[in-house]
Image (cartoon, helix red, strand yellow):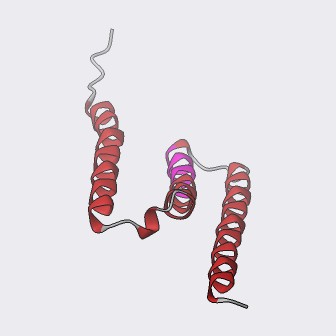
Amino acid sequence: MSHHDIDIDKTVRTYMMVFAALIVGTILTVGASYIHLPTGPAIALALLIASAKGSLVVLFFMHLIDEKKFIYWLMGLAVVFFIFELTVPLITEMNNIDLGS
């Protein structure tokens, strides 16, 4: 067995492990839908599971795990802006004052 064959076997094994993790994540997503949580925690749980699955896809299937640190800084910046975009409506909604009719 050549060095090239060993590398391919390792890569296939990695992809199969990521695939298995995505299957587990999908099962967790379906299982979480049967848990009767209030809307806020249910959305937070769904986003947490989806973020973990999305991260696996981006890192392994889109090969960003091998990229340079600059890519990670850009991804981190995107995450910061995403969190900002999620919290602005939440803060705005919490600050609304019911003036009555």
Residue 20 locus on image (x, y percent): 72, 68
Q: Is residue 42 magenta?
A: yes
Which stretch did the figure color magenta?
40-49
Residue 100 locus on image (x, y percent): 32, 14
Above or below: residue 11 compared with residue 2: above
Residue at 66 percent across and 77 percent down: it is: 8
Q: Is residue 10 magenta?
A: no
Residue 66 locus on image (x, y percent): 43, 69
Above or below: residue 93 compared with residue 14: above
Q: Nearer the viewer, residue 18 or 27?
A: 18
**Where's the N terminus, which quadrant?**
bottom right
Residue 31 is left or right of residue 49, and the answer is: right
Residue at 74 percent across and 59 percent down: it is: 27
Residue at 64 percent across and 68 percent down: it is: 18
Identity of the residue furthest to the top in this view: 101
Q: Quadrant of residue 23?
A: bottom right
So how many labels did they put on this image? 0
Q: Nearer the viewer, residue 85 or 61?
A: 61
Q: Quadrant of residue 76?
A: bottom left
Identity of the residue furthest to the bottom in this view: 1
Above or below: residue 15 compared with residue 51: below
